[in-house]
Amino acid sequence: HTFGPRLCHMPCLRTLPVGTRAVATIVLVAVSIPLSSGDQDLCELEKAGVLGWMPFSGNIILPKHTAKYEAARRQYAAVNFFNRTRPSVVAQVQTESDVQAAVLFARACNYTVRMRSGGHSYLALSSCDSSTTPCLQIDVGFMNHTKVLKGGKQLVAGPGIRLAGLADVLHEHGLFLPTGECAMVALGGHMQTGGVGMWARHFGVLSSQVDSFRIVLADGSAHKIVSPVEKIDGGGSIVKHGWTGGISNDDIFFAVLGGASGSWGVITEVTLNPVKNEDFFSVYWKVRFVWDTEGVVSMLRVWADLAAENKDDTRWSTHWTVGGVLPTGVSPNIIALEASWVSPKDQAGEYDAQFFQTIVDACVGCQIIDAVNVTEPMSSSLVNRYLCCEDGPEFPAFQYYEKSWQQTASFPDADATEAIVRKLDELLPAANSTYLLIFQLTTVLKPRDDPTISLPWPGDVVGVVCDFFFPDPRLAPFFKDFVNSFTEAVVDKFGEDHRAFWGAFGDPDLVFEWDKYYESEDKFKTLQRIKADVDPNNLFCNNMSVPLPDEALQSDDTAAVYPLRVDWMAPAGFIFALIVALRQ
């Protein structure tokens, strides 16, 4: 059976189960599919030694399927990083066995693997450049099921469900989980990189709400990985689960939740521990102002003082957003304050509305565009007020971007906050500018003492975003300088350069910049050890994946080499789907 210039001998009938022989013969015998010039042979199955039977119910999409391929490869970063979003093969999976089949195919046929749940990686880390490395993108977006269990104490969800869909299910059942604000981000990547959002100051990030997950590892095996902490029914003690089925449960739980998504395997299901709306008193504020430099400086100085005075009270949270939007001609530059107060029901009488009102009143002379101040269930605020943004780039006419994110372990004082605001003011667009700007200063983090997850910088409390959007890629160096200038100002005032995987920017590589993403070398080396245990051949890799302990720089320009063994099986169901795709 010819695949390109070399022969790929398919031992069709060697080890198939009873009842599949006739089907396999019809499907796999005497198929000749020449590839276009320059394409790598899709598979040399003789290297696999045996042909295992594993069904595949998903879709296989190749570059030759132009319209389908363009739709399948499309993601947030597809314009900014065109070449990084050109996988050799896209496998749109629907079941865990589909994922296993895809992983086994990649393993047997020397493909690297990237995983995509929603496709919102700013650096296109959920896709790959097939011109430099044969690569398979496993898209779990269709695995978007949900089920509420144990009377609302647990929610089971597929990794492909978007935050908007997750929020709807929670709201329907009177439940709540703290998530980020981007409605079309999917659960799979979100929960692995923290899941930061305004309510995280009250409850902790979404990663801290994970009870268990299912994962397919590099050898194609599927496992249920459970939290070492009993998180429901009043528990809280750490219970070591040790080694089961040849893998360390606790190591994988630790690594997946914070240890660089895309490094460990493919998440196929997540079990989360929500809270009930009825157990909490919740208030949501949102006030939007026309930008006035001196008024905003005054308001943020008051915020800084109040935040420092009340830093240990996690019942309040604030989320500042500046929209530099003058070039649209629709509205002026604005600043919005979103705020929440959440406490147990028995502390409702301690709610202090003046806390937020004092901040708002400090913007002397500022024009208020609109305001909301409502007492309502948290899930209602999440669904109807907090979640935002359509799928894909925020601004279709300004699709290129330069982004940054810094976080710190202490609230900046009033002088530091003012310095950041004045630096921002220098960068805001004026009339007829050729760019947009989004800035956020937000309390989306809660200090935690949880040794069971590896999420970086556990003591941090405040984060700062500064994103520039522009219409022409030739402007990228100019805005990169803008980002670097702002980042330097923030780091100078924070006194530290802490970063997060979900907001990684520039062109980072953990081999050289691990100390910006992990608070200790011990944690980084622990993750490297786990990587060597569960993925010794680096099947799952990208520029920001955890490197093997002895690994030199791995990039899209370097193809990983996998020693093939006779007990690796190229799954017949996947091969069949691939053949059908090739013949279309």
Image (cartoon, rainbow, N blue to C red):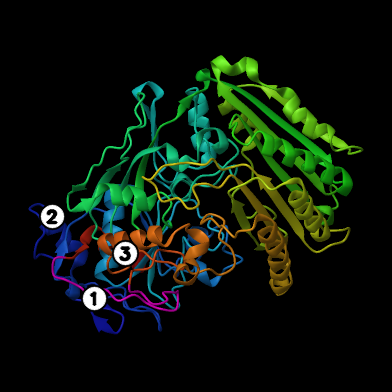
Q: Is residue 464 above or below residue 82?
A: above
* Residue that numbered label 1 is attached to: 44
Asked whether the residues under the numbered discs 3 and 1 touch, taking CB atoms below 8 Å apart as contact, a structural biologist would say no
The amino acid marked with disc number 1 is Glu
In screen coordinates, is 225 left or right of 257? left
* Residue that numbered label 2 is attached to: 20
Picture quadrant of residue 444: top right
Query: Does the stretch in magenta take in 553?
Result: yes
Disc 1, SS: loop
Judge by depth and name the residue closer to the eye, 215 or 169: 215
Q: Earlier in the sequence, mark 3 or mark 1?
A: 1
Residue 362 rendering spot, x and y as whole percentages: 84, 36
Q: Quick one: quadrant of the C terminus? A: bottom left
Q: Is residue 385 above or below residue 403?
A: above
In screen coordinates, is 512 left or right of 297? left
Determine the residue positioned at 49% across, 64% down.
515
What is the spatial separation of the Cα atoms under label 3 and label 2, in whole angstroms?
A: 18 Å
Indicate which label's residue lies in the foreground, 1 or 2: 1
Disc 2, SS: loop
Determine the residue positioned at 52% across, 58% down.
71
What is the spatial separation of the Cα atoms under label 3 and label 1, in whole angstroms?
A: 13 Å
Query: Does the stretch in magenta take in 65?
Result: no
